[in-house]
Image: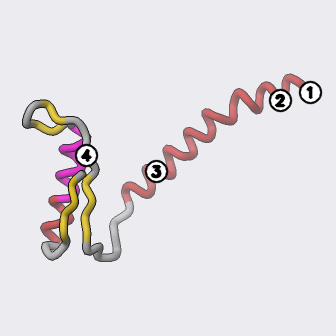
Amino acid sequence: MNKWIFLIILLLPPLYIIYMTFRMNKVAREKLSYHSPYVLILGAKLFGDRPSLSLQNRLDVALEYLFSHPESKVIVS
């Protein structure tokens, strides 16, 4: 009995992480089907005047969205 409890406790966190990773990837790939009046770009690290890779990716996606929805307002944190 103790073996099974230990095995469940040992396997549950990695299985949960794998499940959540697949869910996040699925949602990240979905295309937006609605127009949002605002675009929020979350901040990240800057290297002098250059954005980090994560910030650059966020800016690229926001710019792509703004080309197709130029009336949207941008909020950068």
**In 3D space, how far apart are the residues under numbered discs 1 and 4 (Cα atoms)?**
49 Å
Which one is nearer the viewer's eye here, 47 or 28? 47
The local secondary structure at tag 3 comes to helix
Image: 33 above or below 11 = below
**Mark 3 or mark 2: whose residue is earlier in sequence:** 2
Residue at image position (49%, 44%) is 21
The local secondary structure at tag 4 comes to loop
**In 3D space, how far apart are the residues under numbered discs 2 and 1 (Cα atoms)?**
7 Å
| Amino acid, disc 2 | Ile
Return the residue at label 2: 5
x and y percentages locating residue 39 in the rendered image? 25, 64
Which one is nearer the viewer's eye here, 12 or 37? 37
Front: mark 2 or 4: 4
| Residue 24, disc | 3
Image: 31 above or below 18 = below
Which one is nearer the viewer's eye here, 62 or 38? 38
Front: mark 1 or 4: 4
**In 3D space, how far apart are the residues under numbered discs 2 and 4 (Cα atoms)?**
42 Å
Return the residue at label 4: 43
**In 3D space, how far apart are the residues under numbered discs 3 and 1 (Cα atoms)?**
35 Å
**Mark 2 or mark 4: whose residue is earlier in sequence:** 2
Image: 75 above or below 21 = below
**Mark 1 or mark 4: whose residue is earlier in sequence:** 1
The local secondary structure at tag 1 comes to loop
| Amino acid, disc 4 | Gly
Instruction: Mark 2 and mark 1 in contact? Answer it, CB < 8 Å.
Output: yes
Return the residue at label 1: 1
| Amino acid, disc 3 | Met
Circle 1 crowding by C-alpha within 10 Å: few under 14, some 14–19, many from 20:
few
**In 3D space, how far apart are the residues under numbered discs 3 and 2 (Cα atoms)?**
29 Å
**Mark 3 or mark 1: whose residue is earlier in sequence:** 1
